[in-house]
Image (cartoon, coloured by chain):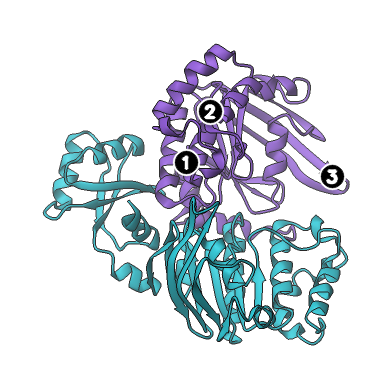
């Protein structure tokens, strides 16, 4: 694997008044890596992810994402990453092609590029008959596949995904992960949160946040070994039990 | 007891079929789980049973009360927790609970025993606005509000969606204690691993129940030969398995691959085949299916 670091942060901290949501976290992510960002509800995952995406300023700490400084160059970060979540990904009242057009435009692609790439994309997803379908009429699994394709449409260096597979049916959930692998093979770094512990196994490395800190970070196999656990679910349970923050 | 017969529901003038003839029954004091992906029709079904949505056709009785004619009685005997957080964000924890108690002519004190277990965990924050609670606390408050009038039947629409594995387990422990107090519980989830916490489950997809049994019964009905395959290079291993003529399906399950195979293929034979293709550390074991395997076998 190419050892270029696309995320590099040290002592990243975010306080809201007296409450330390993210507490001096440090880690690197390499190019083309699939990095699983796990933690219990309220552990600080979303806040940390917002700082990495350049939409929230850290209280302390520093770092670069896609080669740009998270404090001074946060606008440039936004242009070089893709983002999707289960809650927000596509506009329900726009057609499939309109969503692609809109996001392509937002990410600064020209009309000509968008038009050629739209045809390619619809063909690859086997969506040709759905070009004019309103997104709200697509089954969730299809929607998530399309949302992921749109999030990486502009070939970002990194794609951030917040629980992309919540509620997706089992076969689709796996097909979705196969798309993630393809993107990683093309050199796109994948930063993903999930509550499905089987999906943690599909990541190259996994970090687990507890009370704003990163308490474990390694490959799934090494984490299982270290915690003497049969599955990532067990690793997660052991760590989450130590949490003191009320939920 | 819940009795449902041939429920149909469609939206946008018949374009979207949410329920396509659903029939089932739930016994008193049972935990009945409806398991399926988003869009399967779970919320439509639950909203009809909570008397909040009218079916196109079919019959549903909640402890003998008809969901269409007897909606007033139904609302007295059920507790409903919708999928989206639906409490008053600008009221405090305690104000929300008092409000729901008042609606049903009762008080927090009168039914405190029912919610004690759950409410005690959020009581230290009783003056906090509901909108400022964390996800797990919101869920506990919503459940307390659904219980405060001592319902006979509890309808919970995806109470654990977006909840981490540890909090999910705690939530199911709470449901178990409510069941022990005699409450009938109808609960939906998209997490297949929660099936084992139910007395009986229905697997739901595209508006239909594709299976309805005890979790063990669903597993016993599994007709495929299922193996777990391990080896180095998961991605390449997966494509190799998919191109094998005697393998019907292959899907990743955590750090292993589950394959269904045609009769006649032996584990040793496949192991030898994969080793020849230069996969190392290959290990193949026949395994018992999980509910997720069963769901996949029924849908692909």
Q: Residue A142 carries which label?
A: 1
| Residue B212 found in image quarter | bottom left
State which quarter of the image contains the N terminus of chain A. top left
Give the CA separation, mark 3 to mark 2: 40 Å
- Residue hosting label 2: A97
Q: Which of B83 and B284 is in front in this view?
A: B83
| Residue A57 found in image quarter | top right
The image shows residue B72, relative to residue A208, as above or below, that is below
Seen at 67% across and 58% down, the residue is B84
Which percent across, then down, holds residue A61?
77, 32
Eye-nearest disc, 3 or 1: 1
Give the CA separation, mark 3 to mark 1: 38 Å
Q: Chain B is drawn in which colour?
A: cyan
Which structural element holds mark 2?
Answer: helix
Which percent across, then down, holds residue B235?
35, 36
CA neighbours of label 1 inside 10 A, class few (<14), some (14 to 19), many (20+)? some
- Residue hosting label 3: A16
N-terminal of the pair, mark 3 or mark 1, is: 3
């Amino acid at each position: 694997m190419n050892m270029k670091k696309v995320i590099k942060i040290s002592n990243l901290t975010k306080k809201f008044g007296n409450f330390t949501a993210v507490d001096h976290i440090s880690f690197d992510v390499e190019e083309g890596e699939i990095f699983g960002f796990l933690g219990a509800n309220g552990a600080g995952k979303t806040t940390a992810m917002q700082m990495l995406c350049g939409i929230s300023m850290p209280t302390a700490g520093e770092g670069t994402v896609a080669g740009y400084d998270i404090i001074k160059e946060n606008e440039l970060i936004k242009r070089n990453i893709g983002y999707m979540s289960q809650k927000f990904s596509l506009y329900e009242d726009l057609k499939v092609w309109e969503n692609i057009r809109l996001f392509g435009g937002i990410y600064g692609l020209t009309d000509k590029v968008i038009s050629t790439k739209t045809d390619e994309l619809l063909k690859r997803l086997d969506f040709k008959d759905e070009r004019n379908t309103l997104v709200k009429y697509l089954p969730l699994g299809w929607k998530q596949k399309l949302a992921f394709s749109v999030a990486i449409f502009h070939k970002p260096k990194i794609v951030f995904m917040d629980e992309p597979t919540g509620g997706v049916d089992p076969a689709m959930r796996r097909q979705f992960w196969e798309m993630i692998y393809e993107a990683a093979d093309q050199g796109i770094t994948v930063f993903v949160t999930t509550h499905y512990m089987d999906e943690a196994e599909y990541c190259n490395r996994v970090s687990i946040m507890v009370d704003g800190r990163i308490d474990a970070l390694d490959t799934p196999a090494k984490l299982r070994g270290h915690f003497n656990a049969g599955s990532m679910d067990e690793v997660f349970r052991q760590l989450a039990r130590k949490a003191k923050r009320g939920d | 007891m819940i009795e449902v017969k041939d429920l149909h529901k469609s939206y946008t003038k018949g374009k979207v079929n949410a329920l396509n003839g659903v029939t089932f029954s739930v016994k008193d004091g049972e935990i009945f789980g409806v398991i399926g992906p988003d869009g399967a029709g779970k919320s439509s079904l639950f909203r009809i049973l909570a008397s909040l949505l009218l079916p196109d056709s079919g019959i549903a009785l909640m402890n003998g009360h008809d969901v269409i004619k007897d909606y007033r009685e139904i609302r007295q005997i059920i507790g409903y927790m919708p999928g989206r957080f639906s409490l008053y964000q600008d009221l405090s924890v305690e104000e929300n609970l008092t409000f729901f108690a008042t609606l049903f002519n009762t008080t927090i004190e009168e039914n405190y025993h029912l919610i004690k277990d759950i409410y005690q965990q959020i009581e230290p924050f009783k003056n906090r606005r509901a909108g400022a609670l964390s996800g797990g606390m919101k869920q506990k408050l919503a459940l307390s509000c659904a219980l405060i009038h001592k319902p006979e039947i509890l309808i919970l629409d995806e109470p654990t969606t977006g909840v981490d594995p540890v909090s999910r387990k705690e939530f199911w422990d709470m449901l178990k204690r409510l069941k022990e107090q005699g409450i009938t519980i109808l609960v939906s989830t998209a997490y297949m691993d929660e099936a084992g916490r139910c007395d009986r489950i229905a697997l739901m997809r595209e508006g239909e129940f594709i299976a309805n049994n005890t979790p063990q019964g669903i597993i016993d009905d599994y007709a495929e030969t299922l193996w777990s395959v391990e080896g180095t290079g998961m991605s390449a291993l997966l494509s190799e398995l998919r191109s094998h003529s005697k393998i019907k399906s292959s899907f990743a399950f955590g750090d292993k691959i589950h394959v269904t195979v045609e009769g006649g293929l032996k584990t040793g034979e496949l192991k030898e085949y994969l080793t020849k293709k230069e996969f190392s550390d290959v290990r193949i074991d026949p395994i018992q299916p999980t509910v997720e395997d069963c769901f996949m076998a029924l849908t692909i």
